[in-house]
Amino acid sequence: MSTGRASICNFTLLTTPFAEQFGVLAGAGATGMGVCEGMIPEDWTSERVRAELDAHGLRATICLPALLAPLPLVLFPGPDTVDERVAGLQESVRRLAPLEPEAMVILTGPAQELLAAEARERAVDGIARVAEVARAEGVRLALEPIHAADASDWSLVDDIPGAMAILDELDDPNVGLLVDTFHLWDTPDVHDHIRAAGDRIAAVHVNDRGADHRSWADRRVPGTGIIDLAGWLRACEDAGFRGHYDVEIFSDNGAFGVGEYDDSLWNRPPADVARECVEGLERAAEEAGVSA
C-alpha cells in the first residue's frame, strides 16, 4: 500500500485546530481525512470543508456524525429519545454528504436500562430511518461493533457476526460494516470473519494497542503495539476492500476525562504524529504484501 490509501481521523490530532489539520495531513503524505462532525467549527459550511480537502489533495474517508447512534450514549451528552437522535443523524448525513465520504459511521448505542430485545428493535429501526436519508444523499453507512470491554457504553454488538446479523436484518446494501483494529483485535477468528464479510466492509479504522493498555482512550500509532496489523490488512484486501485505511487514535491527555497520560500523542507535535501514522501503515502494508 502506498500513501495513496492512508487517511488520518481528526480525533488522532484532537488538540490541533481543525483548520490546521489539512496541511498537517497533506504534509505527512496522507491522501484522506476522517472527518469528525463535532470538530468542524460552527462557522464552517460543508462547502468550505470540501474546498479545503480539495485544495490539499485529500478525500473525506470515514465521517463521524456528532451523535453517532440512535440509542443514547453513556459518555457523550445528547438527546435522550431515539426520534430526536435519528433526526440529528439524518441531518448529519445531509451536512456531510457534500464531502462525498467513503462512509459515515453509525453505532447502535447501548441498551442501558432497556431489555435487550427492545433496545435492538429501537436501534435497528433507527438505523433504517437514517439509512433512508443516506441512500437518498449518496452516503454509505458503516455499522461499527465495539470491543466487548467497552460495549456497554457504546453498542449492542461487539464482534463481526453480531454486526452482520443486524445488517442482515436491515437488508440494505447501502449499510455496510466498519472494522476497527482496536475494537476487534482479540475476537476469535476475526480475520476469517473479515474475509467472509467481503464487499460488505465499507470502512476500516486502524490503530494499535499497547501491552500496558489503560483505557479505550489509550491507543497507539500503527506498528507500535501488539496488534497483528499485517494480518488485518491482508484479510481486508482478501475481502476486496480497496478504500482508505483511516488511522483513528484516542490518546487522552485529560481532554476526554478518561485518563491524563503523560505520553499522550495529543501532547506531541501533530506533524510528527501524522508522519508516524502514515509510515506505520506503510510498514504494515509492506509486511502484508499489500499493494495499492
Image: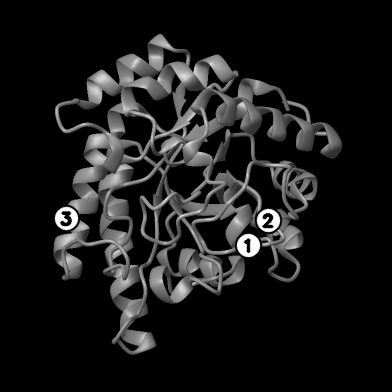
Q: Position of residue 190 (x, y in %)?
A: 71, 63
Q: CA distance from mark 1 to mark 2?
A: 5 Å
- Against 84, residue 251 (above or below) is above
Picture coordinates of residue 253, whole percent (x, y) = 44, 49
**Residue 212 sits in which quadrant?**
bottom right
Label 2, on which residue?
Answer: 210
Q: Quick one: quadrant of the N terminus?
A: top right
User: In the structure shown, which secondary structural element does the residue marked by tag 2 occupy?
Assistant: loop
Mark 3 residue type: Ala
Element type at mark 1: loop
Question: Residue under circle 3?
Answer: 87
Where residue 178 sits in the image (x, y, percent)?
Answer: 53, 52
Residue matched to label 1: 213
Image location of residue 123, percent across then percent down: 32, 70
Q: Nearer the viewer, residue 194 or 49?
A: 49
Measure the alpha-carbon separation of dots 3 and 2.
38 Å
